[in-house]
Amino acid sequence: MIELSPIVACICEGGAETAIIDMLVDNDLLIFSRDQMLNEEVIRCRNAKVFEQRYLRKGFESKITVLRVLDSHSEGFRLSPAYEQKVDVIKVVTSPEIEMLLILAEGKYDDYIKKASSMLPSTFCKQELKMKGNIKSQEYVRNYFTDLNMLTSTIQEYKRIKTLKRGEIYLADLLK
């Protein structure tokens, strides 16, 4: 089980990630609550310096855990030395893209793997699965995953089939 600080800053890369975290936290499916979240909301700030200026200069009594939900293994997030001991940064990787959850939910992972070398997951969703609209939007994800059991089982399946680098975790690791 992951050790989180009393205060959790959940930084999400995009609308789909934000919707998923919001749905899970609002339905008490995560190992942290909305009350624990910094400002009680998902944060959309990917730059460490901007994050420091907006959120860390308030003077917190305890450590803060920053959960960065993103699809990149290599995107940096370097805090200044003043905050390095006060903040634990954990990468929650959804590589190659959060749309992999849609592919898994449709039962089309094997079909995607056959085309993975030439097609992004988002393109596969649109071209092969005929998904319409902005599949990366909060609204699309909320409408698609109205069944939270399907969402959580898809998140767990994603962890089963993927391999991460050291220091990274999966969305599944945040589930209760």
Image (tube, grey):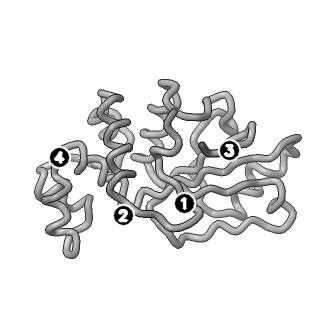
Q: Looking at the image, is 61 positioned above or below residue 111?
A: above
Q: Nearest the camera: 54 or 89?
A: 89
Q: Residue at x 43, y 39 (%)?
A: 19
Displayed quadrant of residue 34: top right
Q: Which residue is mark 3?
A: 3
Badge 1, how many Cα within 10 Å: few under 14, some, many 20+? some
Q: Secondary structure at mark 1?
A: strand
The earlier-in-sequence mark between 4 and 1 is: 4
Q: Secondary structure at mark 2?
A: loop
Q: Residue at x 75, y 37 (%)?
A: 6
Q: Amino acid at mark 3?
A: Glu
Badge 3, how many Cα within 10 Å: few under 14, some, many 20+? few
Of circles 1 and 2, the one toward us is 1
Q: Amino acid at mark 1?
A: Glu
Q: Looking at the image, is 33 positioned above or below residue 70?
A: above
The earlier-in-sequence mark between 3 and 2 is: 3
Q: Which residue is mark 4?
A: 107
Q: Which residue is mark 2?
A: 96
Which residue is at the far bottom? 117
> How far separated are the C-alphas under marks 1 and 2?
14 Å
- Say left or right for 165 vs 79: left
Q: Secondary structure at mark 4?
A: loop
